[in-house]
Image: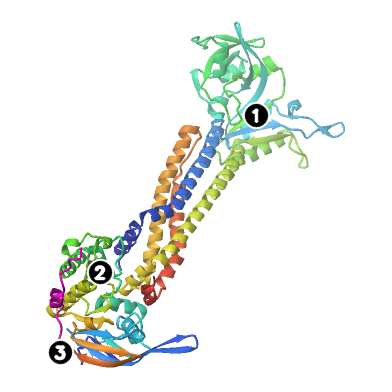
Amino acid sequence: MNVFNLFRIAWKALVRNKLRAFLTMLGIIIGVASVITMVAIGEGSKQSIRDQLSGMGSNMINIRPSSNVTVGGGARLGASGLQTLKVEDVDAIKEKVNFITAVSPGFQASGQVINGALNWPTTIQGVSPDYLPVIREWKIKDGLNFTEEDVKTMAKVCVIGQTIVENVFTSGQNPIGQTIRFGKIPLKVIGVLAEKGENTFGQDQDDIIIAPYTTVQKRILAVPFVQTIYASAVNEQSSDTATKEITAVLRKQHKLKASDEDDFSIRTQAELISTISSTSELLTVLLAAIAGISLVVGGIGIMNIMYVSVTERTKEIGLRMSIGARGIDILLQFLVEAILISITGGIIGVALGIGAAELVNVFMQWPILISNSSIILSFMVCAITGVFFGYYPAQKAARLDPIEALRYE
Amino acid sequence: MANAILDIQHLKREFKMGSETVRALRGVSFNVQPGEFVTIMGSSGSGKTTLLNILGCLDKPTDGDYLLDAVNVKHLSRNELARLRNRKIGFVFQSYNLLARTSALENVELPLLYNSGISSRERREKAMKALEAVKLADRIDHLPNQLSGGQQQRVAIARALVNEPVMILADEATGNLDTRTSYEIMSLMQELNTQQGKTIVFVTHEPDIAAFSSRTVTLKDGHVIKDSKNENIKSAKEALESLPVNDDY
């Protein structure tokens, strides 16, 4: 019997019992739709976390001082009080480490920013000119970034975030060229940063003033040590290599012996991303597992109905055999019926799942990501479900004795 | 008898029922020539159902030979038997066995679906021709539940004819029908036999049905007790005309 006839026979048998075919499909439809929707939600949240973290500069490497010094009865000092990193370390990293594109010292200070009658509590960040364009990949919306020359001269200039603009400037006022005060230091606004919004942890990233590091270090803080060193790896993959290189350079720079602990710690953004993504990865796997179970339940539904169908249609099977259907013809007919049910259910399920995911996106504002792989996968699972759960009932049908099947009432 | 349609020699069929052996057929021999209309008679328990199953290639004899159109079925596999049923035999059952919710045309096409050598156009043409032969050309799209018993049986006969079998094998084909409709079916059978030369083997237990055939084989307890040519074949058409006109309602 040719394949076309086979599908024709199976299709007609299904159409003869539309409601039952649909009810059987329902299990598969729900299973596939929930796989698609759940995975879309899981992948969507993973993607959005990844995007936000990448927005912070996915190649960014943070170096902070840490203590190998114990004082008193063995108590360690916290990082804020530590003074192990120096501007010379930054220069050494810049010179000797190959896998980085930029490096910048970081000096942070908190304080009140004042413009006329308006003031606002914020943070000032003192960095090198590479920090914004290379390390953070942060665009300046209006005006300009400061230069190496500004660093050398401890220029009283700054680039400000959107939150600062909103809080210390009246609407319509152009901040560029205005002078604001951070504490007692007057700073000329030369640029405004593009809006970034909140980060993953709910922190307002736009609530910041960026200035040359020398200005912050010497004019505001007046400290000799560096609080943080920011570096940018060539790409996400090379951040591990860059970390190793930096470790080696800093250990040499700090004249640490092989037995000494590092007096600094290095965090990479890639590390953070993988930690957080692995959490949402787990979420996706869990959701997919729940959905997968419903797919299996749907498959068992098919098997159940196919068994009932074989019993109910015993006489039909007997007739088909008496007019020349071989065992294999009957087997294939029931198998194709099961596969048609599961694949048709799969198609409806995929459409429904995509629809449901879009609805979640529109009404609940959850990020979604419908991946082709989840569609292809659940479709394949459907076909396999059809074959697997359809085979035994089909085999039962094929093994019927035509004489007994014909006499069956 | 080289060109007999059906040739059975010393056919035996035994069933094991627990420790007992039931001997349904105890050595049956006869043959059927092309164009014959044979009825096989016998009361229940005579072995006629067993014989029918063997003649229809649904079952194989325990002993003896059965040659259908010069093919000995003894050595055939299940699949080869299925092929033989598809190409050489047309079954007509007592309970019609039409597929529900399937049009008359599609029911008639069914055997051809299991014959991969036939295109869908050919299939349709053959099914139409078969339905014309049973005078149901105007009912091709009707579903079985929209047809009377007699019409359903005619669809079943069309289905038996569609593969151009060497023999039509009918099993109590008039058992579910009233006298008038039975005569209509027998009239159609006679027509197929005389005008188109179809070989028909008709299993029945009703003697008045046997009167329409050209030969009657009677079974009892697994033996042929009588095998006689019918010298005075009754015409079903005339019998039908002689029935009183139905004016009950």
* Labels 3 and 1 within one chain: no
Q: Which quarter of the picture shows residue B51?
A: bottom left
* Mark 3–mark 1 distance (CA, rounded to whole Å): 119 Å
Mark 1 or mark 2, whichever is nearer to me = 2
Please tell me whether residue A401 is drawn above or below residue A83 in the rendered image: below
x 50%, y 88%: residue: B19
x 73%, y 37%: residue: A262
Q: In what element is the residue under mark 3?
A: loop
Question: Which image quarter holds the N terminus of chain B?
Answer: bottom left
The subunit carrying tag 1 is A
The kind of residue tagged 1 is Ile
Q: Which quarter of the picture shows residue B231?
A: bottom left
Give the percent coordinates (x, y) of residue A212.
Answer: 61, 19
- Label 2 belongs to which residue? B112
Q: Residues within 10 Å of mark 2 (few under 14, many from 20)?
A: many
Q: Is residue B245 magenta?
A: yes
Please tell me whether residue A307 is drawn above or below residue A61 in the rendered image: below
Q: Residues within 10 Å of mark 3 (few under 14, many from 20)?
A: few
Pick whichever, A173 or A26, lies toward us. A26
Q: In what element is the residue under mark 2?
A: helix
Pick whichever, A396 or B56, lies toward us. B56
The subunit carrying tag 3 is B
* Mark 3–mark 2 distance (CA, rounded to whole Å): 37 Å
- Label 1 belongs to which residue? A229
* Mark 1–mark 2 distance (CA, rounded to whole Å): 82 Å
B126 vs A5, left or right, is left
> Which stretch did the figure color magenta?
B233-249
Q: In what element is the residue under mark 1?
A: strand
The subunit carrying tag 2 is B
